[in-house]
Image (cartoon, rainbow, N blue to C red):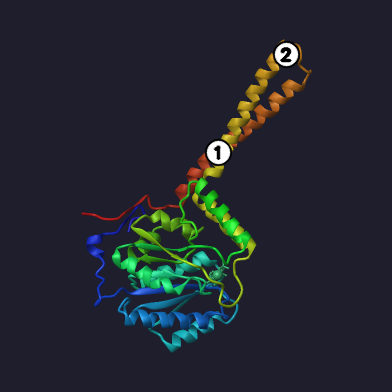
Amino acid sequence: MATDSVSRGDFLHSKTVSATHPPKIFFVVPCCNEEAVLVHTANVLEVKYQQLVQKTAISRDSRIIFVDDGSKDQTWSIIHKLHEGNEKLFGGVRLAHNRGHQNALYAGLMCALKEGCDAAISMDADLQDDVGIVEKFIEHYVKGDEIVFGVRSARKKDTWFKKTSAEIFYKVFSWMGAETVPNHADYRLMSRVALEALSEYQEVNLFLRGIVPMLGFRTSKVYYERGERVAGDSKYPLKKMIAFAVQGITSFSTRPLSFVTFAGSVSVLVGFLMFVYVLVSLFAGKAIAGWGSLMCSVWMIGGFIMLSLGIVGEYVGKIYLEVKHRPRYCIETEL
Ligand code: UDP
Ligand code: MG
């Protein structure tokens, strides 16, 4: 498929979902050093799978894929054992080294696409995402939504710091002109069509929470309360969280570069006003020798340097957007 456009081709891929043809859903779970929780998570997901199959909500061919993101503990051997115990249900993908949650998730989603899923549900290994809303995800999908976002209704269990920093991040992200779904982490359902569109985004600095809303299509939200981690420790310490936020902003916005142009223009303007002020004070006989010319030079030269940097930045920003080779548009329907 060309990188320019993504054709949904409804007439080819229309959902043939019914009680006799329930969708083939793949659960994609990235795991990094999750030995403490993995067996429990697999059990919970297996029970969920059985319930959904019984209700004919999902096909028997549905699968659970664990992506081992370069774990150093027993994670991969647990995944291996789960696969040996039930080859049809449990699948595993092992990354050669730790590439981070977003890359691990993307790898799993692309595998699900390759293996012919109708839709994939991504969730964390620690069961913080409420498995109880999976039915709702599937209901929305069957009704025609291509992407269903799991959104946290309240952050009651979060610390004040985590809650406030998240709010600030969503505000800054939207000021920067990037689109995101507030309080949505990576718990979502994506249909095959949406996954195909996602596969057209070839950027290396992945920030899926920014890319997925950009895809468009018919989307919906399902609200849930996020629980505590079942076992093990968070793999997202403060340092990684900040890096992730910076990654998100710099991957989606060149506005910081435009701020430099703006600041440069303001500085030149101040320099000009300073010049007028110096002239006025000179004629009024109140000028202090040397001060005026010095201040004018500082503001003017500083401003011109900043403005020049900003102009270079505008071009760098354009180059940055070009090298990402993002598709220009996604076609939803063709007649
Ligand atoms: N994870 C990963 N690679 C990493 C860090 C995390 O695959 O480098 C996975 C991790 O195993 C979990 C999910 O990403 O399934 C979210 O991580 P975690 O629950 O530790 O983050 P938190 O919920 O504390 O923000
Ligand atoms: Mg977690």
Q: In this view, does 158 lie above or below 333?
A: below
x, y (%) of residue 41? 49, 79
The answer to whether residue 308 is seen in the rendering is: no
Residue at numbered disc 2: 282
Q: Can residue 151 be seen in this view?
A: yes
C-alpha gap between disc 2 and disc 1: 37 Å
Q: In the displayed structure, does residue 129 sit left or right of residue 5?
A: right
For badge 2, the amino acid type reads: Leu
View quadrant of ligand 1 = bottom right
**In this view, the mark in front (2 or 1):** 2
Q: Percent position (x, y) of residue 190?
A: 38, 65
**Residue 32, label in figure:** none
Q: How crowded is mark 2: few (under 14 residues within 10 Å), some or many (20 or more)?
A: some
Residue 304 picture location, percent across and down = 62, 30
Q: 62 and 143: which one is in front?
A: 143
Q: Is the CB atom of the residue marked by disc 2 within 8 angstroms of ligand 1's nearest atom?
A: no
User: Seen from this angle, which residue lies furthest left?
Assistant: 335
| Residue at image mark 1 | 312
Determine crowd level at label 1: few under 14, some 14-19, many 20+ residues with C-alpha closer than 10 A.
some
- 241 or 167: which is nearer to us? 167
Task: Give whichever of discs 2 and 1 has the lower sequence position.
Answer: 2
The residue sitting at 61% across, 62% down in the picture is 240
Nearest the viewer among 145 and 298 is 145
Residue shown at the point (58%, 54%) measured from the top left: 246
Q: Which amino acid does label 1 sit on?
A: Val
Q: In this view, does 263 lie to the left or right of 279?
A: left
Q: What element carries label 2?
A: helix
Q: Is mark 1 on a helix, strand or loop?
A: helix
Tell whether circle 1 marks a residue whose Cβ is less than 8 angstroms from ligand 1: no
* Quarter holding residue 135: bottom left
